[in-house]
Amino acid sequence: MAEFDKIIQNGIEEYGEKLIGILTEELVKAGKDASGKLIKSLNVDVKPVGEALFQVLLTSEDYLKYVDSGRKPGSYVPIKALKQWTRYRGIPEEAAYAINNKIFRFGIKPTNVLKKTQDRMKNETDIIEKAYAEYISSIIITRIKEI
């Protein structure tokens, strides 16, 4: 990877760290941090896809989609996961069946943590803009030195 691309990648990785920080805040605010497993699973992978172009991929536990968009009535939650959740919350394990029936009847309300994170990240684009500005400056300085 070119030295210049590394400048961009560092800026995008900093952006990714900020993304994880804000998403973590949103999950905690929504009360979705019982075990900490979901938050610990958050990761951003930055992969080059061209000259000074990168793909940013957020990875997490699969159930982030249910935390974010909720669950419609008519389906049960895996009982093993629900029993584990009751232990983290200090709820008797036997209550998992009643909770699951309620989820089946009424669903789970969405938290929209991804949209909230995305909205807050709109104010953070200066991190990437700064990295690209540094990238362009480095190219200009290098080319001037070559003259």
Image (spheres, rainbow, N blue to C red):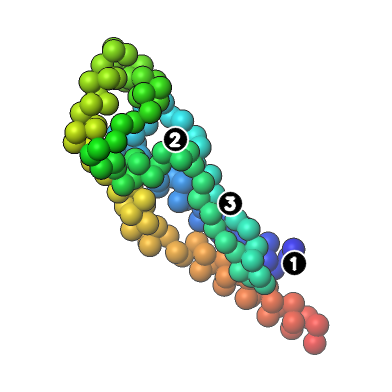
Residue found 49% across the figure and 42% down from its top = 60
Foreground disc of the pair 1, 3: 3
- Residue at the spot of label 3: 45
Q: Are marks 3 and 2 in contact (CB under 8 Å)?
A: no
Residue 24 at x, y = what percent? Answer: 40, 41
Quadrant (top left, top right, bottom left, bottom right) of the N terminus: bottom right
Q: How far apart are marks 3 and 2 (CA)?
A: 17 Å
Left or right: 74, with 61 as reference point = left
Q: Distance between the residues labelled 1 and 3?
A: 19 Å
Q: Who comes first in sequence, dot 3 or dot 2?
A: 2
Q: Who comes first in sequence, dot 1 or dot 2?
A: 1
Foreground disc of the pair 1, 2: 2
- Dot 3: element: strand
Left or right: 3, with 53 as reference point = right
Q: Who comes first in sequence, dot 1 or dot 3?
A: 1
Left or right: 12, with 140 as reference point = left
Q: Reply above or below: 60 against 141.
A: above
Residue 8 in view of the camera: no
| Nearer to the camera, 143 or 90 | 90
Residue 86 at x, y = what percent? Answer: 32, 19
Residue found 78% across the figure and 80% down from its top = 145
Residue found 64% across the figure and 66% down from its top = 49
Residue 30 at x, y = what percent? Answer: 29, 38
Residue 105 in view of the camera: yes
* Amino acid tagged 3: Asp
The label number, if any, that marks residue 2 in the structure image: 1
Q: Reply above or below: 133 against 106.
A: below
- Residue at the spot of label 2: 38
Rendering quarter of residue 138: bottom right
Residue found 25% across the figure and 38% down from its top = 74
